[in-house]
Image (cartoon, rainbow, N blue to C red):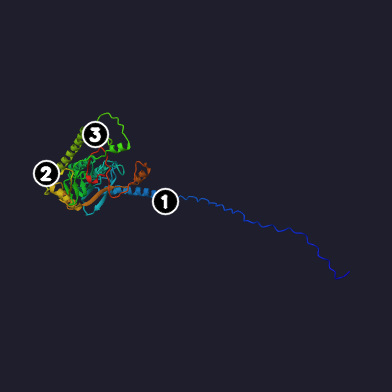
Amino acid sequence: MDDNFTQPPQNPAPTQPPPLRPTSQPAYTPPVYVPPPPRAKSGTGWKVVAILACALFLCSLVVNPLHVLFGMMEGAGGGLPTHNAVGPKLQEALLKDNDSKNKIAVVPIEGVIMSQKVGRGFSMVDVVEEQLRRAEHDKSVKAVVLKVNSPGGEVLASDDIYKLIDQFHARTGKPVVASMGSLAASGGYYVSAPCQWIVANELTITGSIGVIMHGYNFRGLMDKVGVRPEVFKSGKFKDMLSPDKREEDITQEERDMIQSMVNETFEKFKSVVAEGRGNAVKKNAGAGDANHPLAENWAQYADGRVLSGKEALKLGFVDELGNLDTAVARAQKLAKIPDANLIEYQPLFDISDLFGMLGQSGEARTLKIDVGFDAPRLQMGRLYFLCPLVLPR
């Protein structure tokens, strides 16, 4: 045997073939979004509100007794607290400090004169009554200036304020001077009539002496849309002011009755003007102050027309042209005092008012935004001493 002979290699053991690759990619599976756990509410907002409410309450406990104390100190002549416990809450505010022991109280009559209770549950009549009560019992108050800036309003509310002013002067003898602003017409003039002296700017809109009852009749529109009212009444005049009556159904007798009511109220207005201006002339006759008496033909101008302050002076509806300072100077002269501090009784905010507003139902409290104009809400069937310039169109 040849030593160089080598044995041929043996066949290796068979191996498994490599797996075949898939010809397509597997389906894409999107990731599942897992939301984070909710954050626990800290309640920081409510804590801030609670802290503020507690702070206001504590301030009220401190401030309100101080108001009462200062009110008793300021009203040492009359010994009145800051506000009436059963009426509107008012506090004395200093408008002008003349370093005097005497005071002149300014009582504002602003906006439409209404009998509805607003704000904290009191009407304009209630507030004026409380202001005059404070001025009456404070011996250091020597006179009142009625600051009028009003187009008028309800007949009854205007008459109530007129009586309050007339009775205040009769009880106290303290002079009341009216200071007319930009508008003091109709009911605004009605409440000024009993004043001892009336001051108006030459551009003041005043006059408008008259009565109006305003309303709408919708029957024409109702007939067009096919709406017919069904009326059951106990008497033939029960629906005499209904806004859904046809024109031909309104009898002349009904018209005469309404017009008679308007005329009666109008005669009352004229008597208030004549009596007030006549009394003013008598009061000042012996005091060296000469009022402007009513012109002989003044009733001809009491037909609802508006007048400027300059025209009103010629007819005797006002006594002097000027502004609030003029009225204050005249009040000092009528009261025979050399000087006086000017004050006003303003509403007193109490923390209980805030809690009361939060606790009232939605129908009892309404949030109002002041846009600079107090639009009147006339109600059908009511008489108004109201200047036609502010009637809704």
Q: Amino acid at mark 1?
A: Val
Circle 1: element type: helix
Foreground of the two, 233 or 4: 4
How many other residues sit within 10 Å of disc 3, few (<14), some (14-19) or many (≥20)? few
Q: Position of residue 10 (x, y in %)?
A: 81, 63
Left of 121 or right of it: where is 386?
left
Would you say residue 336 is visible in this rendering?
no
Residue at point 22%, 51% (across, down): 342
Q: Which residue is mark 3?
A: 248
- Look at 25% across and 52% down and name the residue there: 94
Question: How much space separates mark 2 and mark 3, taking CA atoms?
Answer: 39 Å
* Left/right of residue 30 with respect to residue 292 in the rendered view: right
Q: In the rendered image, which quarter is residue 81 located in?
A: top left
Residue under numbered circle 2: 297
Q: Are marks 1 and 3 in contact (CB under 8 Å)?
A: no
The kind of residue tagged 3 is: Glu
Which amino acid is tagged 2? Answer: Asn
Q: Residue at the spot x=14%, y=49% of the render?
A: 313
Please give the residue where the numbered disc 1 appears in the rendered image. 48
Q: CA distance from mark 1 to mark 3?
A: 66 Å
**Where residue 97 sits in the image (x, y, percent)?**
23, 54
